[in-house]
Structure formats: structure tokens, C-alpha cells
Amino acid sequence: MGIDDELVERARAWVAAVHPHARHLNRTLDWLLVLDPDASEALRLAAVLHDIERAFGPDEAPPDRTDPISSVYTAWHQERSARLAADWLGEEQHAPRALVDEVRGLVGMHEDGGNPDADLLQAADSIAFLEIQVDLFLDMVRDGRISRAAAERKFRWMFDRVRVPRAREIAAPMLAAALARLGVAF
């Protein structure tokens, strides 16, 4: 394990200790490394930390979450996750400012993508979502927290936003399986 890996492993340990969906974040890193085995330290850290805000109660009321793909909500989620990731890296891990800034920038773009690294992060997040988080959304439909249509929109959005061709190949059968499970269950 190199010096770079030590900080990534500390991030994984922190996420495992605080995040209710740590497996999703870990699988995002795993999928990132499938897509780019030579991913930078910043990109690997961003994969592990991209949804960190969901580990903590909001310090302010989040925008309406009834639409899981609302651009207002995703912007809020990205910014809050970026801030919390940067705080942990800078204040608790004493990571170099340039690394903290790079991770903050990537986490702040993980839903939207927009450059090659952010597109890889977004793609890995989408694959991990379709692999891990479908049950969470099926439970939300069962519990009446979101509609069946909202879950279907979220599943399709997670696939449709992917720009990385290899990631689309991997995610396509996952999307089909998620939609089939949604159709059977409801």
C-alpha cells in the first residue's frame, strides 16, 4: 500500500463508521477502478466521499426531496458533500490544499459530470447505484415515501446521465434488471 492508498483507506474507514450506505460509496470506488485502474488519488477519494453529506443530519433544511432527481436538490447535495469532504480532508487529515481542492471540485460535480474525471466519478456512482441502491428505492416506494414513477425516473436518470461508453455497457443490464424488479414489485 502506497502513501496515496493510506488516505483512501482512512476515508473508507471513516465512511464505514458514519455512513448508512457505506457499501455504495465503497462500490463506487471499486467501479471507478474498473473504469480507470490508474485513477488519481483525488478521484479515488472523491469516489469514497461523494455522498458523505447523507451521513449527517442537515445543518439546514434540504430542498424538497420528493423528486429524487431535482436539480435544486442535487446541487445542494453536491455542494454539501463537497464541503464536508473538504473539511474532513483538510481539518482532520491535514491533506495538502491542492488535493483538498481537487476532491472538493470532483465531489461538487459528481451528479452532473462535466470533465473527464467528473464523468468517470459520475459513471462509477451510477453503476454502484444500480448495483446497490435499487432495494433502497423499492423500499421507499413500498413505504409510500416516493411514487413508483419517481423511482423509475431515478433509475433511468442514473443510467441516462452516464457519458462513459464502457460504463454504459456495464450499467445497461443493471438498469433493465432494476426496471424489471420495479415492474414486478409494483
Image: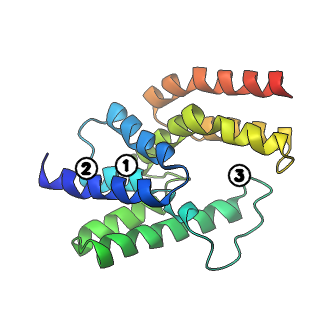
Residue sitting at x 67%, y 22%: 176
Judge left or right: residue 40 versus residue 123.
left
Residue sitting at x 40%, y 52%: 48
Contact (Cβ within 8 Å) of mark 1 with mark 2: yes
Judge left or right: residue 86 versus residue 129.
left
Vertical placement of 7 versus 21: above or below? below
Q: Which mark is residue 117?
A: 1
Q: Quadrant of residue 184?
A: top right
Residue wearing tag 3: 69
What whole-number distance in Å separates the C-alpha atoms at marks 2 and 3? Answer: 28 Å
Q: Amino acid at mark 2?
A: Ser
Q: Amino acid at mark 3?
A: Ile
Q: Which quadrant does the N terminus fall into? A: top left
Near mark 3 (Cα within 10 A), the count class, few <14, some 14-19 or many ≥20, is some
Mark with earlier residue (1, 2):
2
Mark with earlier residue (3, 1):
3
Report the front residue among 145 and 72: 145
Report the front residue among 48 and 63: 48
Judge left or right: residue 48 versus residue 53.
left
Label 3 sits on a secondary structure element that is loop
Q: Amino acid at mark 1?
A: Asp
Report the front residue among 88 and 16: 16
Contact (Cβ within 8 Å) of mark 2 with mark 3: no
Label 1 sits on a secondary structure element that is helix
Where in the figure is residue 51, as x and y percent of width and height?
51, 57
What whole-number distance in Å separates the C-alpha atoms at marks 3 and 1? Answer: 22 Å
Residue wearing tag 2: 40
